[in-house]
Every structure is written in C-alpha cells, then in structure tokens.
Amino acid sequence: MPHKIGFVVVSSSGHEDGFSARELMIHAPTVSGWRSPRFCQFPQEIVVQMVERCRIRKLQLLAHQYMIPSKVEFYVSESLPEYFAPCQAERFRRLGYVSLCDNEKTGCKARELKSVYVDAAGQFLKLIFHQNHANKYNIYNQVALVAMNIIGDPADFGEESSPASREKLIDHYLGHSAEDPALEGTCTGKSDYISPLDDLAFDMYQDPEVAQIIRKLDERKREAVQQERYDFAKNLKQAIADLQKVGERLGRYEVEKRCAVEKEDYDLAKHKKRQMEQYRSRAYAQLRLHSLVDPELVQRPFDVPLQPLVRPGSPRRPPPPPPPEERGAETRLAGPSLQEQPSARSPDGAPQPRTAGPPSPPAPHARLEAHREPLPYDERPLPAARRLPGAAPGEPDRSDVDAGEAPRGGALGEPEPLTEKALREASSAVEVLGEALVAGAYSKTWSHREDALLALHERLAGLPAGAQREELKSALRAAVFLVRRAIRDIVTPVFQASLKLLKMIITQYIPRHRLGRLETAHCVERTVPVLLARTGDSSARLRAMASNFIQELALFKEVRSLQMVPSYLVQPLKANASAHLAQSQMDLLARLLRDLGTDGTGFTVDNVMKFAVRALEHRVYEVREAAVRVVLDMYRQHRAPVLDYLPADDSTARRNVLYRTVFEGFAKIDGRPTDAEIRAQKRAATEEAEKQKKEEIKVLQGQLAALREMQAEFQEQESGEAAKAEAPGTSGAHCGGPGREAAPPRAPGAPESHCLDNLCIFCGERSAAFTEEGLDLHYWKRCPMLTRCEHCRQVVEICGLTEHLLTECDRRDAFGRCFRCSEAVLKGELPGHLRTRDCHPAKPEKLANRCPLCHENFAPGEEAWKAHLMGPAGCTMNLRRTHVLHKAPPPPQGRGPAAAKAGSSGPKAGSKIPTPKGGLSKSSGRTLTKR
C-alpha cells in the first residue's frame, strides 16, 4: 500500500536567509518552507533524495500565497551524477509539469495544495521552478514552496508476501469482487489505497504530537479489525475523528503563539502556551479515561521545551527553557484539569514506549463530546483547496473536550475584561445580560465570542412565556446589539452563530412572547444593512451565507408583511461600492423578485426599474448582465409600463450592446423575430434568389446551345440542298435539255431564320454591325446594361456590380457592404458614406431593385432593370443611356476604316469580353467572361 516516503534535501540553486530548502523536510502548521533568493535567475532547482528506492505514486506541493511559480517540472533519477553541482539534466528523466494559479481570485490570501499522480521509480527527485506570477505583494520576484510530500511504494516490494495479495486471494476464493458495493469505502484488497493520514493536508493542519497519536490509533484500529473487535475499532475511529479536531485546534494555538512571539507580546505567548497545555491535558485525559490509548503514549513532559520559535538558519537564537519556578507554576495551573486521572511520567521526563499485549476492552460511550462546527476553509491557519481527511461535514466540533457537560471556557481560560470604551459602548447590554456574557462577545478570542452568542441563544430560548414584557424587550434589544456586532465578525463560526441567534429571535422569541411587529421591524432595521454589507465580503463563502440568509429572512412570514427587505435592495448602488457588493445585491434582487413578485411585497415597477436602469451603466460586466435579466423579468410580468423607463427602440439606442440585448429579449418574449433572425431570413432569401437565378441562367444557356446546334444543322442542310440543286442544273444547261433552267443563286444578304449573331442579348438591340468584333465594341462602349469596373477594368452587368465588387474584383478586400443601403463601399470611406444623402435604406430584393449608379430603389424584376437603365425616365447616372435615346447610324461591315477605328478603340489585350458566338455565361458576380 502506498505510504509517505521520507526524504532529505540534497541541493538547491539558492535560498533566502532563514528559508532553506531543508525546511521542506518538516511537516507542521508552523513551517515556513523554502524561498528563492531575491531577484533570482530562473529556473530554480531543488534536488531531494528519498530514504529508499521507491515507486512514486503521488506528489503534493503546498504553494505560497503570493510567491507562486508559474510552472513546476518534475524529474526522477536512480542516482546522482558524478559532478554533483550543477546537476546534469541528462541523468534525470522528465515526468512532466504542473501549472499553478496566480491566486488573484482569493486576493493572495490562500495557499494552493496541488496533488499530482505519477508512476515512476527512482531515488532522486528534482523540482524545477519557473518564472513567478507577478502581483503587488511579491516585490522581489521570488518563488516559494511551503511543503512537499512524496507518497509511494518500495520499488523492490514483493507482492507475493504482501497482506494485500493475501486478501486478494481470500476474496477470490470467497467470490468477492473489488467492485463489491458492500466493500465500498474500505481499503481491504486495494493495493493503491492511500491513507488520509499520509496526505500533506493532514500534517499541515495537525499538531505534530497529536498527529503521531492519531497514526498509532489508526494502526490499532486496523489490528482490531483484523482481530474482529469491531466495537473497539468503532470507538477508535471516533477517537481519531475527535483527535483530528483537537490537533487542528492545537496547531492553531501554536501559530497564534508564534505570531505573538514575533510581535514580542510575551504575555499573550505565555497565555497561549498555558492554554495549549490545558487543552492537550484534557484531551489526553479523555483518551486515558476510556482506555483508548496506553497511558505512556499520551504523557507529554511539560518540562521539555517545545520546538524553537525561530526558523532553522535564522540569526536569532532559540529562547532558553523556562526556569524551574515558572515550570512549576505552569504545572500547578494545569493540575486541576487533570484530577480525574493524574499524569504519570517517567523519571527522565520522556514518554515510555507502549507495552505489548492486547489492549483493555473499551468503556461504553467512548465518544468525545463536541458541539462546534468544524473550522471552515477561510479560518484555517494554512488554507488549502480541500477538507481535512476524516472530518465529516456538518459534524459538531467542540473547542474543548471533557468527560462531562461542564460549561465551555474553563479549559481555554476566561475572556479578558471589558475596556472602558467597550463598557461605554455596551452599557445597556451589560445591564441586561451581564458583564461576563458581554465580555465574551467582545473578547479577542473568537471561540469566546462564539460561546457568548451560543449562551445568549440558550438564555433567550429558555425565558419563560410569562416574563415581564419590558424585560423581554430589553433582552431583545441587547441581543440585537450583540448580533449586529457579530455579523461584522470576520471569523466564520462567529458569523454563523450570529445568524442562528437572529433567526431564533425573529421566528421564535418574538412570536412566542407576542412582542409585535415593532420589535420585528427593529431587528430587521438594525441587521439587514449590515448583512447587505457582508454580501460584498472578499470571502465567497461569507458572501453566499449572507445572501442566502437575507433571502430566507425576507421570506419569513413575520418579515414579509413588513415589506422592509425589498426597500433596502432597491437602494441605488454607490459609485465606490465593491464589485462583489453590487453583484450580490443584483443577484439577491433577481432571486427575491422571482419569489415575491411586485404585488404588495415592497417591490414596484417604479423602484425596480429605476434601480435596474442605473445598474445597466455599472462598470462591472456581471452587474450589467444581472440588470438585463431583471429588466427582462419585469417586462415578462408588466410589458408596457417597463418601456417607459427605457429609451426608444431605434438605431441610436441599439448602438448600445446592452440595450440591443434588452430589445431583442423583448422581441423574443413577444414572439417577434429579432434583428439577427431578420438578417438570417434576408440572407436565406438572397441565397435562394441567387440560386434560382443561376438555375435560370443555366437553363437559358442550354436553350441557346440547342438553338446554335439547330442553326448549324439547318445551314448544313441548306448547303447540301444547294449543292444538289446546282449539279443537275449545270448538266441540263450543258446538254441543252428543255425545261432545265438553273436555280437562281441565293442572295448573299438574305436573312436567315433563327439567327442570333446580330443580337445583343443584354439590351436586345439588333444590328448588322454586330459581328464578333462589333459585339465586342458594343459591349465595351455602348451597351446600356453593362459597365466597366473602375478597379479591375472588367465589363460587368450593372445589376451585378455590387456583388462583383464584393466577391470577384481584384480589390474586393478593400470593399465592404453598407448595412443600410446594401451597396459596396470602400471600407475607409464607410463612415463618411453613412452621412451622405445617397445612403438611404435599401428595400428587400423581392420588393425593389437597387441601382448602384444612381442609388435609387425601383420596381423588382429583370425587365425593370431594362426600363430603368434604358428608358427615357430611367437612371440619370447611366451615361450609355444616351446611345439608346439618340442612336447613331451603324458602322459599315468589313475591315474598313470604321472597323479598324473600332478595333483600335476596343478592349485591351487580355480583357475578358464575351461574344455571342462563343456563348455567354453569367457568373454569380455577374461578370462576363469568355468560355
């Protein structure tokens, strides 16, 4: 089974004074870990040697809260190179890397625990740290590592003799499977099971001494399971869970003690030390009382000094052990808490080894009393992104552990007396509740503050129903005063206790004693503003708790009728309010609107819409999005009244993305198509029209080809008949037979039926001058349905000029389509084009055509193009139209001077000009090209 592997630090590329890499060999709540030198060169390296050659299964890194490397690489090796410094990278095998987050979401107040599962064998491990994440706290560009943990198996471990293999054989013989749901949650037969006690989070939260006891109890629990002593194993399991909470509390006290020493507050440090000893002795007494552990195992010599308070390598020397007089006084102070079972010590003060033999049977009810919830994520001394192993969520957790139901505070000391300022501030509460309880609520120790609130909860819940009304009101006012103060507390258990007390006052205390709506209004008025302020806390846990409680409070029947909570939620957001506060207020408003509605609840269309419209202009994107959702919810309920608080739905308002989103949301609610859907429909209609147009062109081209084939066959047939008629006529004339006259020759200029060679298929003009060269000249200069592109000099149809510029022109990348008039405009001139008179909205293609020359809309259809481009009242910008209105005499055929002149002024060499004889094809961009 994989277990924790010990290691020693072989080398490092450097470290800051007092933060050597050897600190990584110690796992405790107070370790400081390794730090790189200031302004160091990257990457930084650390090489560790494991105590034995092993197969690594899991690596764990606890990062610093703000000295965070962007990436950490892992290398493994069987042995070190000959030249140790610097390490040769080629002797190490690269395993991979992990990336660490920059910790901006937590404000650099939490540490990331990164676990990496690997499968590699070796004895040396190298870590390479890359460039740090930049933040305002890391002014020296350092990287740090608080702790690291290696979990693995010995590499030469034989599975033939392993207990896990024996268990697998037994399970196979009995027909059990590893996937048996009855065995879920157990480690029997699982060779890859990793104990939670080997996890890095366990050691970093636990007092080292208690952690060792927990591990020994875990071994005894496994032995008891193998011996089938399940009652004893059950009691050991519960003792382990309770000891984890004790070790966590002792670790916290140790951190507080060291902080006091660094601040040179030695009175507080002495008090914390005494508090730790008393708390530890009471916990150990419970274990001895129920015979859960051997007495020698939990004896801790009080005359042996604790770990030094200075870091290894620090220039400061550790303080000497306390003098005998002080030690004696501390032992006497701890004595009364150990009266149930005196502490037995060895003569030399060291704990005795545990004797062999089966342990004595456990006493019944071997459970440590507890009633405090476990420490949350935000209150642990070394925050990490996981819970403590073995700590069940929601299980009560007590700050002290005793055999009976003695009141809290005895083992942890009494709260400090009130200062003069506190006495003046809380004088009314002291008169009603007593100085002891108020002193606990004002204590600097959070456990005393929590105890005071819990005691006040019990006192108010136990007041008889027949008490004096004035006394009940006074107690209520005093309790609300302390609750208001506790709501501001940064410690989560104290904040939770204040919410619990406030809920009891509103839902139980006031109704039971019939104090009336006035006292309920007093509670809401004094606490809701403070709760709203806590919704902007930096801790996401506290924000969620405050928001959920406000929502729950507003739904209480005693509070709902007052309509007070909604009035606080629609107060305008302050300009300097935090983003968390604004976002929480908007989310809370949206949730309560869905729960309460606007009929007699304190929410009205006026106050909600005024608040939401202001929130639409907030600097935080999440707040604006929440405001859009609120506006849409209000429109879904009230429709027309909501529109009075918003600008008109026009192009100016739709330039704002949020208003465009709001108006499109209105359209969806009303069942109308949105702008995006309209554009999609237009695009689909345009594509369908283009598709139909291409099909029509294809059909026309096929018909034209068929006509040419018929014309060719007809000409061949006529020429054959003429040859036949010519031959007998000649012979008859030669012979001089009667009645044999020659047929008259066919006139060369006689028109041929179905002739298309003299016809322009675009404008419909027919001319004898329309030979192949004449048609080229006509297309190039005179056809009123065509024009030349000014950018690529190709001849295109006027009706397809816009699509040509956007899709086929050599400079098509420089053009863009105007969203208003749908014409092709140079992208650089588009802003100025929108301000001109020519840019007026285009109608859909089914309703009107759009002329790219005069920028006017006219009737739809192909024939309308001819009327517009060729008619007398047509396009005023088509200069070729005058050729149609004032026709000149056609030029003579042949190769005369006119033809030569036309050829000289014709298209340039290489131009793509269609001719009727070569066949016409219209592309999607309406460009005319030769086949």
Image (cartoon, helix red, strand yellow):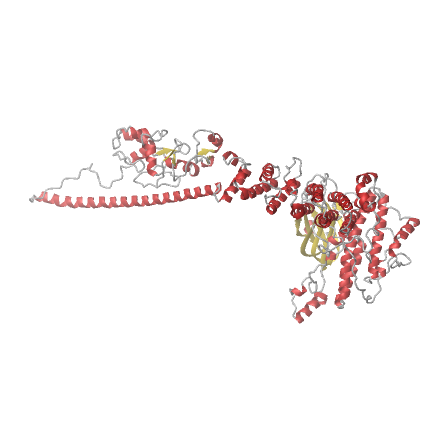
Residue 518 location, quadrant: top right
Q: Residue at x 15, y 45 (%)?
A: 725
**Among all residues in the image, which is located at the extreme right?**
325
Q: Position of residue 66 (x, y in %)?
A: 71, 43
390 and 406: which is toward the camera: 406
**Among all residues in the image, which is located at the extreme left?**
738
Residue 220 showing in the rendered view: yes
Residue 784 showing in the rendered view: no
In the rendered structure, the answer to whether residue 501 lies left or right of residue 623 reads: right
678 and 805: which is toward the camera: 678
Q: Quadrant of the N terminus?
A: bottom right
Residue 195 location, quadrant: bottom right
In the rendered structure, the answer to whether residue 452 lies left or right of residue 653 reads: right
Q: Residue at x 22, y 41 (%)?
A: 753
Q: Position of residue 798 (x, y in %)?
A: 37, 35
Q: Position of residue 670 (x, y in %)?
A: 49, 43
* Residue 624 vertical position relative to residue 5 in the rendered view, above or below: above
